[in-house]
Amino acid sequence: MTVPTDLDRRFRDAAEREGLVDVAYDLADSPVGELLVAVTERGLCRIAYRPDDALDELAEDFGARVLRVPGRTDPVRRELDEYFEGRRREFDLELDLSPVASFQRLALGELARVPYGKVTTYGDLAKKVGRPHAARAIGGAMNRNPIPIVLPCHRVVGANGKLVGYAGGLERKELLLRLEGARL
Amino acid sequence: MMEAAVTIPPFERFYAEHRDEVYGVLVRRVGRQRAEDAFQETFLRALRAYPALRHGDHLRAWVLTIARNVVIDAARRERPAAELEEQAELPRRPAYAQLEHLTDRLPPTERAAVVLRYAYDMPYAAIGAALGSSEDAARQAASAGVRRLRGKELS
C-alpha cells in the first residue's frame, strides 16, 4: 500500500523539526543535469552529480540519518538557480567541510578565491598553498571536491590551458565555464 | 577492492524500502485515519534508534516490531488493559518463527525486547528507542522476559 504523499512529507518535516536528521538533501534540476544538494546543521556539505553514490558517502561522512527533506535545501537551490541564470557571481552560503582533510581544505580555500569567469592552473594553486611541486595533489583535491560549482573547481585547468579533467565530466566543466563567459 | 563490513544503509534507503509495507500493516491494523499518526511515530522512533544500530540486518523485522509497539502504546492510551492482549498482534509477523512461537505468551513489551535482542541481535539502545523507552528499560524487559520463559520451562 503506497504511503500518501502528504503523509510522507509530514514525516520528513517532523524528522527535521525534531533534529533527528544528520544530513538533509534534495534533488534539483540544472543545466548540468540533476544535482543532489545536501546540508547539515552547519551548512552546505555536498553537491553531487551522481546522487545514488552520494547517499552512501554522506552516511559515512556525517552519520547514517540521511533523509530527503525538500524544504531544507531551498536557500542553496535558490542561489544555484540564480547562478545558472547568470544573475549570481558569488555564493553566500555557510559550508560544512568537517570531513575534509587539512591539505584539501587549504586547497579548496584557495580555490574559493578564483573569481567568476576566470581560470587558474593546478600549478598555480599549488604555489598559493605553499606547495609549488604539489600540482598533482591539487588535482586530487579538486577531483574529490565535495561541493563542486559553489567551490569552483571547474575554474582550474592544465598548464597548457586545456580543461584536462573534471569529476563531473569535461562537458559539464566546459558548460560551466561558458556560462561564466570564461575565455577557453 | 572489498567494501568495509559496516553497512547500515542511509536512512532514506531504509525508509524507502519499508515505508509502504509498514503503512499497509498499520492501515489493516488500526484503519487509515489512525495509521497516519502511527506511521509517523514508527519512523520517528526508528530514526531516534538508528545511530545505535551496529549492523544493517533484520531491519524489516525491526521496523515492523516498532510499528507493533506503536499500535500497542496507542491502544494503551485509549483502551482498558483487559482488551490489550488481543491488540498485541500485527497480522504479519517477523520471520524468526521459533523464537516468535516460544515468546507468544509473553507480555508485548517483554516479547518485543526478547525477540529483538536474541533473534535479531539488536543493541539495547536501539531496542529501547524502538519500544519508546530507554536502554535500561529494554534490558530489564528482555531479562524479565527470559526469566518468565525459564519459569514456564520449569513449571
Image (cartoon, helix red, strand yellow):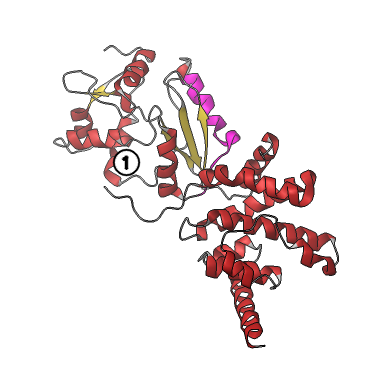
Question: In the picture provided, is A70 more to the left or to the right than A144?
Answer: right
- In the picture as drawn, the residue positioned furthest to the right comes out as B80
Residue appearing at x 17%, y 38% in the figure: A131
Residue A43 coordinates in the image, percent (x, y): 48, 40
- Residue A56 drawn above or below residue B6: above
Of helix, strand and loop, which one carries label 1? helix
Residue B135 coordinates in the image, percent (x, y): 58, 69
Choose top left, top right, bottom left or bottom right for residue A174: top left
Q: What range is drawn magenta here?
A: A65-83
Residue B38 coordinates in the image, percent (x, y): 72, 51
Whether residue B147 is in magenta: the answer is: no
Question: In the picture provided, is B44 more to the left or to the right than A135?
Answer: right
Residue appearing at x 45%, y 41% in the figure: A55
Whether residue B12 can be seen here = yes
Choose top left, top right, bottom left or bottom right for residue B155: bottom right
Residue named by callout 1: A105
Whether residue A75 is in magenta: the answer is: yes
Residue appearing at x 63%, y 50% in the figure: B43
Whether residue B124 can be seen here = no
Q: Amino acid at mark 1?
A: Arg
Please, which chain is the residue tagged with disc 1 on? Answer: A
Most common secondary structure along the magenta stretch: helix
